[in-house]
Image (cartoon, rainbow, N blue to C red):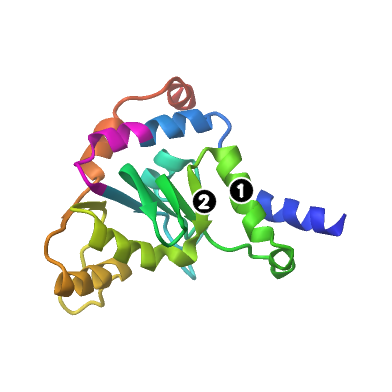
């Protein structure tokens, strides 16, 4: 019984912010539409904002939410133009969603993290769900495997430290030179001009 409540609590932590007014089918349709616009042999990578210490309440990245319905921090979404074999997870995927490991150590002791991933995949409609610990490895995989990579990179000044993504891109450029970085924002901006019935009701 205790194990059941621990797992239930962890799942609630991850899924409590999912908005019922917009169904998982609607978010799936948005992702599928985006993938249709992508170039051949490409991947799109989105991340939710991390928690910033000292700031007020957490605010999810609006584009990340638009595609996923997810508002928890430190989550990542990979969309592949075509179903690809992902060595890091040992499986094929058309879309891959990464979430942090279970925060509750006792839940992890009972394999709670895997249970949460399965529940998120079934309840929220993601193709494959895995741990966000794989993010850096999947970035490197993307640079080596795909010709075009859609990712929103924040610009930094000459004297400012590189972001996690920019540093990995720099390292990849030293070894590989045949991939291009594209912004997903133009596609998303066009998509977001078309409102669903649920969104229109929310605006009223």
Q: What residue sits right under mark 1 in the picture? A: 118
Q: Which residue is pictured at 27% across the width and 71% down the height?
A: 168
Provide the residue span drawn in magenta: 32-42
Q: Secondary structure at mark 2?
A: strand
Query: Where residue 58 sits in the image (x, y, percent)?
Result: 50, 56
Q: Residue furthest right?
A: 1
Q: Is residue 144 visible?
A: yes
Query: Where residue 146 sits in the image (x, y, percent)?
Result: 23, 54
In front here: 197 or 59?
Answer: 197
Query: Where residue 7 sits in the image (x, y, percent)?
Result: 73, 55
Q: Residues within 10 Å of mark 1 (few under 14, many from 20)?
A: some
Q: What residue sits right under mark 2 in the picture? A: 129
In front here: 56 or 195?
Answer: 195
Rendered view: 167 above or below 127: below
Instruction: Verify CB contact (< 8 Å) between mark 2 and mark 1.
Output: yes
Quarter of the image containing the N terminus?
bottom right
Query: Where residue 162 sits in the image (x, y, percent)?
Result: 25, 74
In front here: 61 or 15?
Answer: 15
Residue 95 among those drawn in magenta: no
Q: Seen in the image, is 7 located left or right of residue 168?
A: right
Residue 165, by quadrant, is bottom left
């Amino acid at each position: 019984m205790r194990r059941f409540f621990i797992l239930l609590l962890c799942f609630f932590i991850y899924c409590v912010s999912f908005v019922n007014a917009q169904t998982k089918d609607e978010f799936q349709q948005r992702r599928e539409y985006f993938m249709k616009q992508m170039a051949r042999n490409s991947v799109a990578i989105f991340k939710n904002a991390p928690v910033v210490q000292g700031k007020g309440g957490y605010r999810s990245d609006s584009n990340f939410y638009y595609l996923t319905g997810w508002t928890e921090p430190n989550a990542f979404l990979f969309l592949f133009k075509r179903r690809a074999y992902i060595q890091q997870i040992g499986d094929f995927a058309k879309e891959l969603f990464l979430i942090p490991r279970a925060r509750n150590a006792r839940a992890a002791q009972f394999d709670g993290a895997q249970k949460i991933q399965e529940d998120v995949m079934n309840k929220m409609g993601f193709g494959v769900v895995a741990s966000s610990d794989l993010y850096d490895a999947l970035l490197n995989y993307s640079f080596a495997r795909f010709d075009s990579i859609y990712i929103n990179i924040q610009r930094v000044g000459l004297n400012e430290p590189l972001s996690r993504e920019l540093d990995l891109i720099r390292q990849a450029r030293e070894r590989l030179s045949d991939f291009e970085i594209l912004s997903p924002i133009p596609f998303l901006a066009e998509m977001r001009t078309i409102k669903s019935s649920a969104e229109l009701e929310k605006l009223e």
